[in-house]
Image (tube, rainbow, N blue to C red):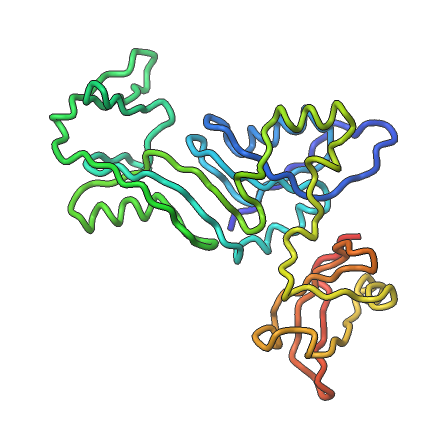
Amino acid sequence: MEVKCYTLLMPMREGQPQLSGFINVNKPVGFTSFDVIRRLRSILRIRKLGHSGVLDKPATGVLPIGVNRATKLFQYFDRMLKVYLTTFLFGFSTDTDDIPEATTLLAEHSQLAVPRKDNGSSPLIEASAIPELKLLTVRILCRGGFYVRSLARDVGELVKAQGCVLSLVREQVGPFRVEDAVGFDEVEQAVSESKFQERVLLPMRVIAEPERTVKLDAASIQRLRQGQQVLLQMSFLPERLRRRGEAVFVLDSRGHLAAVAHTREPVPGERIPLQPARLLR
């Protein structure tokens, strides 16, 4: 998974505390992932924003944006469930297995518009030139490392027709859903009304899966902050997580995400050590 974080040089507003969390952005078509970062920078004036991975320019939908300390958490997005709604086009292919955003299907004229690379008008190719032109819309549930464009190509090869992606909407990334996502106008309005934290910013604990979450006392959290292990009763974790290398989300007494720890090999006394991995508060 490629993680992109950008340190923004524009200062925060005077007196504004450093907020950390996630923004569930509904990326519009025509914007790159960094375009979204750039637009939010101009609205929020926050130093550090990041995204977990590129959502292609022609695609729309969920693009989780990390704010400040939340950018440390993108490595835990790989195991999150992702849902895509996509339409494949068979009988037509591109070098990248998808179609540039300017391409449109003119069904009423049975023509396919293909944009030129120069400044000329888009030429139209008669559908009769591609007699096997077909569309297939599917919803895909997957996790990190899956590429929708590759599936379009592979399915095309299976049915003996070239295939590519015509449209793509990312409907979900873990707890982030497209029906709850916000646009730039909503962010701007929340900021103008001093309601950004209440309406837009999601707490870092939103990514903490309940079965991977433990609440520790202040003394234990302090030990983690000092780089020391904390011993946890194995009964606090489901059996499948009682092994080395599993991520555990640590909440403080107020329910804030204080750290992410990784499990070590169990020790006598039905206990399992937690090694600090990410300190957040």
* Location of residue 133 with respect to 109 vertically, above or below: below
Q: Position of residue 221 (x, y in %)?
A: 82, 64
Q: Residue furthest bottom?
A: 268
Q: Position of residue 232 (x, y in %)?
A: 74, 75
Q: Position of residue 40 (x, y in %)?
A: 64, 29
* Location of residue 104 with respect to 260 vertically, above or below: above
In the image: residue 249, left or right of residue 241: right
**Residue at position x 32%, y 24% in the image:** 103
**Residue at position x 20%, y 40% in the image:** 162
Q: Quadrant of residue 108?
A: top left
In the image: residue 270, left or right of residue 32: right
* Location of residue 63 with respect to 158 vertically, above or below: above
**Which of the pair 129/181 is nearer the observer?**
181
**Which of the pair 192/19 is nearer the observer?**
192
In the image: residue 227, left or right of residue 272: right
Q: Quadrant of residue 254?
A: bottom right
Q: Quadrant of residue 265?
A: bottom right
In the image: residue 279, left or right of residue 78: right
**Residue at position x 56%, y 75% in the image:** 240
Q: Residue furthest front?
A: 179
**Residue at position x 70%, y 44% in the image:** 21
Total labels drawn: 0
